[in-house]
Amino acid sequence: MEPKTKTCKCGNEFIPQYRNLILISKQCIACRCKNELDKRHALKRIALKTPHLPIKSVVRENRTCDVKKKVRRISEKGLIAKLDKVFSLFIRQRDSKDGVFKCISCGKPKPYRLADNGHYINRANMTTRYDEVNCNAQCSYCNRFREGNAQGYRKGLIKKYGELAVDILEMKKHNTSKISSVELQILIDVYKAKLKGYE
């Protein structure tokens, strides 16, 4: 049985080529060669217009332009680190006014550069890690050298939010919950928007 021939746009007859029952050539050899040459000439013209790029890199760029770019995923640890940074900045901005803040633990007014994001309940507890009542501007001395000054911190919290809010916060620490990557990303966006309000 003779293979079926087809007529190309140029008028020449050719035998179509198949790979795994899929038609891979819709043109005669002469037309395919001409198209390939046209592509190469076009790439050379691009390379001449941009002399800092060698021809090979131009070809490589044109080959990969149709391929979808891989979406770079940030790991959960990376998202937590990013959220920590944004949330810490928000807390310090929230609790400072005109470049001065009042430490939640010792009550002393100090310059903004000495502010830390102090946690009443340890930041290892994910349930309260990003709780706005649990986190307040604290001087670096109380936070780092007095192990958070827990007694002073509790008094400061009661004064700022009331005893009921502190009791609720202390109950929350017994809950165990994991924050998903989607929730972390949402929180990052929320606190970035809140930060803009303080700017």
Image: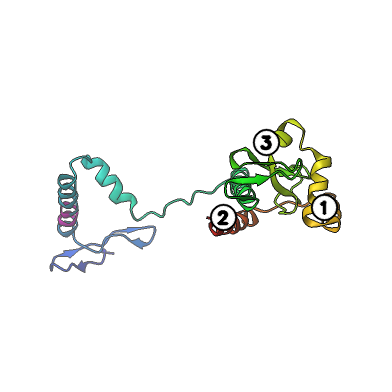
Tell me the quarter of the picture where residue 8 sits. Answer: bottom left
x then y, percent, for residue 153:
79, 44
Dominant SS type (magenta): helix
Element class at badge 2: helix
Residue contact between numbered discs 3 and 2, judged by CB atoms under 8 Å: no
Residue 140 is tagged as 3
Q: Residue at x 67, y 54 (%)?
A: 180
Q: Is residue 154 left or right of residue 49?
A: right
Q: Earlier in the sequence, mark 3 or mark 1?
A: 3
Residue 101 is tagged as none
Eye-nearest disc, 3 or 2: 3
Instruction: Tell me, yes or no, whether the highlighted magenta stretch contains residue 197.
Output: no
Disc 2 target residue: 195
x then y, percent, for residue 31:
16, 59
Q: Nearer the viewer, residue 12 or 102?
A: 102
Residue range of the region highlighted in magenta in the rendering? 33-38
Q: Amino acid at mark 2?
A: Leu
Residue 158 is tagged as 1
Label 2, label 1: how far apart the Cα atoms are: 25 Å
Crowd band around label 2 with a 10 angstrom C-alpha radius: few (<14), some (14–19), many (20+): some
x then y, percent, for residue 94:
63, 53
Q: Nearer the viewer, residue 147 or 63?
A: 147
Label 3, label 1: how far apart the Cα atoms are: 21 Å
Q: Amino acid at mark 3?
A: Ser
